[in-house]
Structure formats: C-alpha cells, structure tokens
C-alpha cells in the first residue's frame, strides 16, 4: 500500500477535472502518465489515477494532476518521493518492407536490413520483425519489442490469415486453383492447408494477378506453390495481416498500431 502523505516538496497546482482529461489530446508521441506508473509495477492504472488526482505524483520535479499527460522514457516520475524505475515501453508497428531488404537485424552479406530503415525511436527500442518476408518479397510486416505478443501471433494455433497479391507469368489453370483451395501437396511432399485464391488475367501478355490468403506459415510457401504450378512470380506483395491492411503506407515507412489494433491480436 503506497504512502498517501503529500510530499513536502510538491507544488500546489490547479486541479484538473476528469472530464477535461478525457478531452485532452495526446500532445506528443509517448505514454500516458497513469499507464507509465502502472507499467513500472507501482500500482494499478486506476490507483495511479487516484494518486495523480490527489497530487501525489511529480514529473521532472513538478507536481502533475493530469493522468493523460504524455511522458517520454527520459522523464522522471516520482510518487510520494519514490522515483520509479521505468521499463522500456512496448512498441508495435506496421511496416511496409521494400524488396531487396532482409528481415534479419544483421546480415553477414552486408545487404540492407529492416533495422537499417527504421527511425531512431524504433531502433533504440530494439523492435524486431514478427515473422518474415523473403528478400525479393515486399509488403506488410509487423514490428515489436513485446516478445509475448509476438509469440502469440506466430504460434500455429492462432492461424492469423495473411493476404498476398502476386503477379505471375504463365497459365493459371483451373486445376492449380482447385489444388490450392483443396489443400495441395508440394513436390517435396509437404502438405498444405487449404488456401483462398482468385486469379484474373492482366493486359500485359501472359500475366495474371493472384489474390491468395494463407492460414499457415510454411517457409516460402507461395513461391513453392507457384513453382509447382509452372508459374513464374514477378511480384509478391503481402497486403494484409489479420485485420491490418497495408493500405497506402509507403514502401520503407512504418506507422504505430492503435491500442484497438494491438488488442485484436490478443
């Protein structure tokens, strides 16, 4: 039970109503004060609200009564004179991986890595890819420094669907489409789960656009499927992971996930 005695050095400030806090927008990229206190293991977020409203919390030497105040990792937070040891906040991003970029954090061949394209904030937080996209593939990739969240997404029992747009050269036969929908067996004997697939011809010669939705994570699965079907892949782009669509996110850029988007993967 934390000591609720008012610290002698705390400065009196005007009380902020809860309704005003609810309406106040986030000023900067950071973490809400009440969430930062809870994440440090001091108390629950609800208890943190009570302590903040009661004037028991000081941020960088100044009393703070706004639970929605955005704090940065370098800010010092003290509760009744006890300064918190803050953990590195978890970050979650959707990244548009370009072609000819590897998903490993270091590459012995000196090729560009996902890490080399990230802004300083993400690199310092040591985010890493959740799953992979091969060197010549592009599109949606999740990044985080939350190991438990990443493991949940990659566990086979969750079967997070992933949607791809694939431009191929060659004749897409009805037989190939039916094999994919039924659950084909690769030439090396690997059995695959049924996948969703649609095909439509493109104007440029013998090219077609495939839309494929996978429910499993076999290494280079689409490339192996198409090779067995006599198709040459010209472009492979992942456009959706679960409920997260790549949309108009530019190649090489990332955006943070919302709390709602993060929670839907729980």
Image (tube, rainbow, N blue to C red):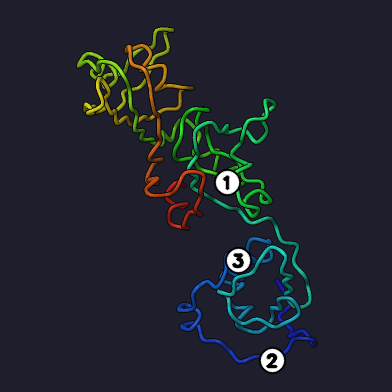
Q: Earlier in the sequence, mark 3 or mark 1?
A: 3
- In primary-sequence order, the first of circles 2 and 3 is 2
Which residue position holds label 3? Answer: 44
Residue at the image point whose x is 69% and y is 78% from the top: 57
Q: Position of residue 93 (x, y in %)?
A: 52, 49
Judge left or right: residue 147 versus residue 22: right
Q: Can you identify the residue that label 1 sits on?
A: 144
Residue positioned most to the front: 204
Depicted 200 relative to depicted 129: above or below: above
Q: Residue at x 39, y 11 (%)?
A: 186
Q: How many marks?
A: 3
Task: Using the numbered discs, state the Cα–Cα distance from disc 1 to disc 2 in whole angstroms.
Answer: 39 Å
Query: Helix, strand, or loop for circle 3?
Result: loop
Camera-near label (3 vs 1) is 1
> Which of the two discs, 1 and 2, sits closer to the camera?
1
The percent coordinates of residue 198 (x first, y second) are 24, 28
Count neighbours of disc 3 (C-alpha within 10 A) and say few if under 14, some if 14 to 19, many if 20 or more: some
Residue 203: which quarter of the image? top left
Q: Secondary structure at mark 2?
A: loop
The mark lying in front, picked from 2 and 3, is 2
- Which residue is rendered at x = 48% and y = 83% of the image? 20
- Circle 1 residues within 10 Å: few <14, some 14–19, many ≥20: many
Residue extending furthest toward the left: 174
């Amino acid at each position: 039970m934390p000591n609720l005695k008012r610290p002698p050095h705390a400065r009196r400030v005007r009380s902020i109503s809860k309704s005003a806090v609810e309406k106040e927008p986030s000023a900067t990229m950071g973490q809400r004060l009440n969430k930062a206190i809870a994440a440090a293991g001091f108390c629950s977020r609800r208890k943190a609200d009570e302590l903040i409203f009661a004037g028991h919390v000081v941020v960088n030497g100044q009393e703070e009564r706004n639970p929605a105040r955005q704090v940065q990792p370098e800010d010092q937070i003290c509760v009744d004179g006890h300064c918190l040891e803050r953990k590195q906040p978890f970050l979650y991003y959707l990244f548009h991986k370009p072609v000819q970029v590897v998903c490993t954090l270091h590459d012995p061949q000196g090729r560009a890595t996902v890490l080399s394209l990230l802004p300083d904030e993400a690199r310092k937080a040591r985010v890493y890819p959740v799953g992979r996209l091969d060197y010549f593939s592009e599109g949606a990739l999740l990044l985080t420094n939350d190991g438990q969240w990443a493991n949940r997404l990659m566990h086979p029992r969750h079967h997070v669907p992933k949607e791809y747009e694939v431009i191929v050269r060659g004749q897409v036969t009805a037989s190939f489409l039916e094999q994919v929908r039924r659950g084909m067996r690769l030439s090396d004997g690997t059995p695959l789960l049924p996948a969703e697939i649609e095909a439509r011809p493109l104007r440029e010669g013998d090219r077609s656009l495939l839309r494929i939705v996978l429910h499993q994570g076999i290494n280079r699965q689409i490339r192996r499927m198409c090779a067995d079907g006599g198709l040459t892949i010209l472009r492979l782009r992942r456009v959706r992971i679960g409920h997260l669509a790549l949309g108009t996110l530019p190649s090489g850029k990332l955006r943070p996930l919302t709390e709602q988007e993060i929670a839907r993967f729980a």
